Image (tube, grey):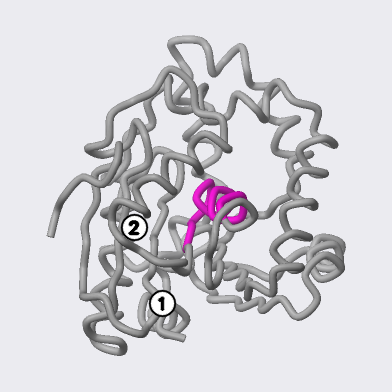
Amino acid sequence: MTTDFGELASDSHGTDDDRPPLVLLHGLSYDRRQWGPALRELAVVDPGRRTVCFDLPGHGESPPRATYPLDEIAAIVHDAVDEAGLDAPVVVGHSYGGALATSYAAAYPVRGVINVDQPLWAGAFAALLRRSEPALRSPGYLRVWESLLSGMGIEELPPAARELVRTATTPRQDLLLGYWAELMTGPAGQLDDRRARELATIYARGVPYHHVAGNDLAPAYRDWLESLLPGVTVTVLPGGGHFPHLAGPAEFAKILAA
């Protein structure tokens, strides 16, 4: 069922029961269509599970905003979660959505977090965005986006998934500049400290955290993650680069079901 909750357009699946509901948050420039392959598999392994896929502000059928600070987007998602009647969901996020799911879980009640291929260290990526800011603000901004896509392993995906990644996306300049504003203007160390505090809060609350990646985590990053989240689950679904949920939707659906 397609409906609006709060400010966000969504697809709502399944019915409320004793299983924790799932909230699915897509990555920057994409929309809720990204979850289609995983949802079809979830219907097989965990039929009827209450699942809501949101379009984030400015994406898909959700209206844009003037600015997109992460904590404000988390609050908008929470309002939508409340209106949808979802009690302490498992929050699942891909790419930017993984950072959003982490920030959400530190601020609001959840029963689990699944971060799909979103490292939480800002440093190197923030530096790249700062160097690229003049180009991002120019008419040729898409060259920066396409350069990033070229390193995401899209060519490894099955043909249908590859087509979904290349077509179900709207990389508008206002979205890239708006959602990346904090990375381009805030001190990278301060952003990393914020993520560390969020993870420490999640751990203190006893919330299970599952990081699903397309490739092995860098050893230093994995050490940092495990130092803040002892017992964190890390699963690698190879063959899809930055899109492991599309490379292995059946395996990913089993993670959602668990």
Residue 65: where, in percent of width, then height? 39, 23
Q: Which residues are magenta?
A: 92-104
Residue 18: where, in percent of width, then height? 35, 85
> What's the distance in space between the residues labelled 1 and 2, CA to CA?
31 Å
What main secondary structure does the magenta stretch of the protein show?
helix
Q: Is residue 183 left or right of residue 40?
A: right
Asked if residue 106 is positioned above or below residue 149 in the image, the reply reads below
Amino acid at circle 1: Pro
Asked if residue 66 is positioned above or below residue 231 in the image, the reply reads above
| x 43%, y 10%: residue | 139
Q: Nearer the viewer, residue 190 or 18?
A: 18
Q: Is residue 74 left or right of residue 188?
A: left
Question: Which quadrant of the structure image shows residue 44?
Answer: bottom left
Q: Nearer the viewer, residue 180 or 230?
A: 230
The residue that mark 2 highlights is: 162
The residue that mark 1 highlights is: 20
Quadrant (top left, top right, bottom left, bottom right) of the N terminus: bottom left
